[in-house]
Image: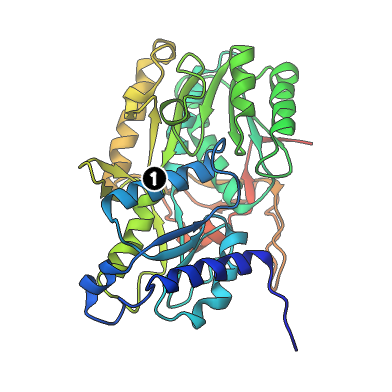
Amino acid sequence: MTRTLGWHTRVALFLIVIALAAGFGSGIGSSASAAAAKNATLAILHFSVIKGTTWSGAHDRAGQRLHAKHPNVKIVVGNAEFMGLPLKDIADKYPNAYLGSVVASDITTKRNFIRFFPRQYQALYLEGLIAGALTKTGNVGIVSAFPNIQVLRRTAGFYLGVQDAAKALNKRVNVYVKYVGDWYKPTEERDIASTLVSQYKVDVLTQQTDSGSPLDVAQEKKIWFVGKDMDTVGFYGWSNTDTVAVSFDTRWEVLYDRMIQDWMAGKQNPRTFLYLGMKDTMTLADGTVEPTVDIMNNKKIGVDAISPKALPLIPKSIVQLVGQRREQMLKGDWDPFTEHEFVSNGTGLELKGTPGTPIPSKGTVVKKAQQVPADDWLLGKFNFDLDGMTILK
């Protein structure tokens, strides 16, 4: 019986064939690192355009940085789960290759099929502290893609920061989420951003989508914007710090570098599950040491990343808290998902399958405060919004 391969699998096979033609895989199991380093290439399957997006743009930048540090590396990865999972089906055919995929909700691994994701929620928590302090109307808006575990988890990190700032400043802050239906829909993202500002009086806007449209709206409406995935002011020149209060920057190269280290060591059994955060770092070719995620704006990091125009509007106690929590996370001494309890809002995404995972009913304490959530649960089962969020139809 002939099976028709999906286009994602065909693309993956095409990349591997090219890599094999260049000597891919000959290093593992031979004379260890020297042979591996001699025959190495990083191939990234992008699910979207690179220029004009933060997600694929950050992956592309990672490839450039790794090429500067390791001129010869050979690994094939998909930068979205639906792009990367087909690699699992062909992993056994290429036992001397490392294949990998970003995690969206499936956490399947194989000996040479690596799954990975950054703990972006840590930097999102810091962004939330800043957003919660900045809002004057008490309304923060999120232009989001669609309900999925990755989005729900990241939004939760941001929301916890907003609410901690609100509690510290003794004010009420509403967080409104409205879904676009996909990751990259510039026109729809613009429409939703405009609706959040005009109808819900949002004066701080962020996104869980990939185009620059929400930022354009924030600039036009003269409200604050909080960025995602990449320092767009510093690396893309999108807008400026009069509009962008802060962004979080994802350094995918830190995760890829772990794979490269295993490859160059000639490991037949590499680390197959990588969930790295602020305490995990790598050193770039120019000597810069960078964590997996951090807050960043106009190429400044940490508290210095807060917009010079926004900084005087944020109480010093919150600025100090941002600095304190960041330092604690860089050392691995504190984590917002461990610190806080998770209470369900009664909204989210019912997970299908056997067994299925229904959305916890509103008010259910899913995780207690000071309890460390399991990584596989965070990546595969976090299917609800946190209590108090407003999910707009």
Can residue 177 be seen in this snapshot? yes
Q: Which residue is most to the front?
A: 21
Where residue 182 sits, quadrant-wise, is top right
- Where's residue 322, x and y in %? 36, 29
Secondary structure under badge 1?
loop
Residue at 42% across / 37% down in the picture?
249
Question: Is residue 251 toward the left or the right of residue 69 in the image?
Answer: right
Can residue 173 be seen in this snapshot? no
Where residue 198 sits, quadrant-wise, is top right
- Foreground pick, 13 / 144: 13
Label 1 is placed on what type of residue? Arg
Q: Which residue is most to the right?
A: 393
- Where's residue 49, x and y in %? 59, 44
Q: In this view, does 320 lie above or below 75?
A: above
> Exactly how many numbered labels are in the figure?
1
In what quadrant of the picture does the N terminus appear?
bottom right
Q: Is residue 264 above or below residue 241?
A: below
State the residue position of label 1. Answer: 251
* Colour convention of the picture: rainbow
Residue at 21% across / 71% down in the picture?
34
Where residue 211 sits, quadrant-wise, is top right
- Where's residue 118, x and y in %? 43, 51
Residue at 37% across / 51% down in the picture?
253
Residue at 49% across / 39% down in the picture?
229
In what quadrant of the picture does the C terminus appear?
top right
Q: In this view, does 2 lie above or below 337?
A: below
